[in-house]
Image (tube, rainbow, N blue to C red):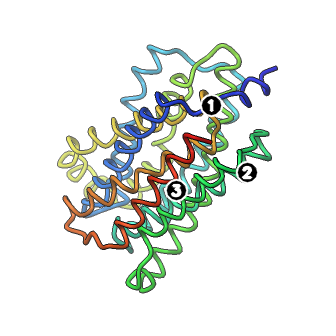
Amino acid sequence: MRAVHWLRMALTWGVVAAVLFGALLHASWNALVKSSTDKALDTAVIHLVGSFIGFPLLLLAGLPPPQAWPFIGASVVIHIAYYVALTGAYQHGDLGLTYPLMRGIGPMLVALSSSLALGEHLSPLAWAGVVGVSSGVLLLGLSQRALQQPKAIAFALINAVVIAIYTVVDALGARMAVAHGGSALQYVATLFVLDGWPFGLLVLRQRGLAQALPYARARLPVAMLGAAASLSSYGIALWAMTQAPVATVAALRETSVLFAAVLGTWLLKEPFSWRRGVGTAVILSGVMALRMG
């Protein structure tokens, strides 16, 4: 019965609007990381702060049911790989290249894996939407200059696979929580309380407290904004995945590259070429196909 319930979900305009807002938040915290002088330390500080922000939410929402905990544990481990690849990508390439590449391939991988793991089968129009969004995202990131950043490309492609894995794992976990009387908020709050510590402590050990603490104090206001944006963005995404098929939500969430391109141009002075304009049009067409599919 629960499986049938998930299969009957649809991508409504309300879910679309929520996920688009979450996409803006997601691009915002990534832009904050890119603007820093130490990407790894900034990512660590943001997610350690996120752990503290998640704690009062966890007290408010309560613990998720036991059935969700295996997924939370797996997700914490997978997210360590995500943070390592994320900081590596931003260390070796600009936001406008690495962000589209790592986010663009993920939706197609999620669509394929969710068919096997969740039994969700997309309509031809929804598949066209997934491919359209992914193609537009990749178009935003591909350029002749991109080929001159092989390390950034390698980190971004690795992270695309990691993103697809944790997306499916967390979708399963959030749905398991809801199916057993819990909520997506319980799941995401617990995840954030635990999530930041492994990678954060690893980076702090590498940098040393003498270097890390002054940096963390100076970046604390930015880290608080980034942590709030990150938690809110992912919380919205997981809630949406309890309301609509995972693959469509995952693809829609990657419209964050549009916001990332704008933020990269506006805040980081990265160029906005005609290629990015075409990619934007392709993504918007994909979004409409997702909604209609």
Question: Residue 113 — which label?
Answer: 2
What is the three-letter code of the residue carrying label 1? Ala
* Residue 281 at x, y percent in the picture: 41, 59
Give the residue type that dot 3 points to: Val
- Horizontal placement of 43 versus 138: left or right? left
Image location of residue 103, percent across then percent down = 50, 58
Seen at 65% across and 23% down, the residue is 177
Camera-side residue: 16 or 201? Answer: 16
The image quadrant of residue 23 is: top left
Q: Earlier in the sequence, mark 3 or mark 2?
A: 2
Instruction: Give the secondary structure at mark 2.
Output: helix
Q: Earlier in the sequence, mark 3 or mark 1?
A: 1
* CA separation in Å, label 3 and label 2: 17 Å
Instruction: Measure how far apart labels 1 and 2 are at the Cα level.
Output: 19 Å
Between circles 3 and 2, the one closer to the viewer is: 3
Circle 1 — which element? loop
Left or right, 111 with respect to 31, comes to right
Res 133 label: 3
Residue where numbered disc 1 is placed: 10
